[in-house]
Image (tube, grey):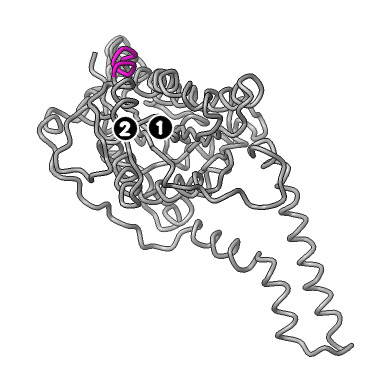
Amino acid sequence: MSSPESEDEAVSDHLGDESKEEKPPRQPHHVRNSLSLDDVIAFVDGYIVSILFYVIVPILAFPRSDEYRPYISYFATCTVLVYLIRLWNYPDRIPASQYFRLHAAPELNWEEQIVLITGGGSGIGALLAETLASRNVPVVVLTKDEPNSEVDGEIHPYICDVSDYQQVESIADRVREEVGDPTIIVNNAGVVKGKLLLDLTEEDVIDTFGANTLAHFWVLKAFLPAMIKKGSGHIVTVSSLLGVVGAAQMTDYCASKAALVNLNQSLRFELDNRYKTPAILTTLVLPSFVQTRLFSEIRLPTSRIWRFLCPPLQPHTIVKHIISALQMGESTTIRLPWYTQAARLMGDGVGLVPAWLRDFLQSIAGADHAMRAYGPKPDAAERLAMERLHDNT
């Protein structure tokens, strides 16, 4: 069965054969320059809500006299509130840390790391590999195709279909012998078919779950034992916002990504409570639309207000947050962009958002029609509509 190794490779399944030809060298991604809600949130969190802001402003702005005591008291109250808000969020970090602490985690020593990335031939995986290699970090890349150009000396590509358990086991032996045991695993490989459920073939479903879900199990089974013996490491699981909330024409993709959300959580419980290795950390990545070839034909609202509230993501943004999570030394969840925080309340299993509101927001976003450029034409919905029309005439 065919099983593209990274999300960017799946386009050929529904957009024709031209993408099966030799790919040109990867071009830099266009960087979005327009202001977005994420920029505003970052500014507020970094400056306006800074504890130092409420300490320095009253000292510099107001003379030390009784006349200005109310203003100083106001800023002091704000300072206390900021502390309380951040203290409220702290307990959520405790189970994600390898131990109780009131100080920052030790800085990650990159000189001691070996990073393994699946789906590293293009898109997010390739950019992450290049970024880490530029820091002289050895990077093992599991890719389906031969690299199109020379790779950095610190990048070690291995041809492997990660949906195939036997191939992963065979490559794992070579990686251990030639590079060493990975200390960081980034499970990033994935595909999308972009078809309605009734248009999906048996092979489509097998391919999707093979690359998007089973590959994570096979890679972990091959490389996790060495981490457990060492007692430390970090596992990054790249899922999707669509693993939390569903959308039409994405049934197989959404289901395969939803499995990763529970895989990540269950794995952390096993590491902490059964293997007794809380120093092996887990990071779950839940991005929305990322501007890669995988979703090059997706149709989303183009208004300024939409792009402000729900900006498309660039691969370098995901890479930046993954590296920050690795350096932080804690298990965490990366939700990007900011509006995806709402998905924590919108999933059917949570039930905190009424179904009518959930459907209304889904309609505004146009999520159920965003993939219409993908799949066969006419698709199953159009064919059945024509059959109903024919039967009624």
Position of residue 120 measured from the top left corner of the image (x, y, whole percent):
29, 36
Q: Residues within 10 Å of mark 2 (few under 14, many from 20)?
A: few
Position of residue 381 measured from the top left corner of the image (x, y, whole percent):
33, 20
Q: Residue at x 57, y 35 (%)?
A: 358
The residue closer to the viewer here, 6 or 256, is: 6
Q: Residues within 10 Å of mark 1 (few under 14, many from 20)?
A: many
Q: Which SS does the magenta portion mostly show?
A: helix
Q: Is residue 142 left or right of residue 319?
A: left
User: Which quadrant would residue 140 be assigned to in this image?
Assistant: top left
Q: Secondary structure at mark 1?
A: loop
Q: Taking the image as drawn, is residue 389 in sight?
A: no
Tag 1: amino acid: Pro
Position of residue 216 measured from the top left corner of the image (x, y, whole percent):
42, 23
Mark identifier at residue 138: none
Q: Residue at x 47, y 42 (%)?
A: 364
Position of residue 393 measured from the top left corner of the image (x, y, whole percent):
28, 12
Q: Secondary structure at mark 2?
A: loop
**Residue occupied by mark 1:** 182
Q: Is residue 350 left or right of residue 179?
A: right
Which quarter shows the N terminus? Answer: top left
The residue closer to the viewer here, 317 or 138, is: 138
Give me the C-alpha separation between circle 2 and circle 1.
8 Å
Tag 2: amino acid: Val
State which mark lies toward you, 2 or 1. 2
User: Which quadrant would residue 97 be assigned to in this image?
Assistant: top right
**Residue occupied by mark 2:** 179
Residues tagged 2 and 1 counted as in contact (Cβ below 8 A): yes
Q: Which residues are magenta?
A: 164-170
Q: Taking the image as drawn, is residue 92 in sight?
A: yes
Relative to residue 5, is residue 91 depicted above or below? below
**Magenta-span inclusion, residue 166:** yes
Q: Residue at x 35, y 17 (%)?
A: 210
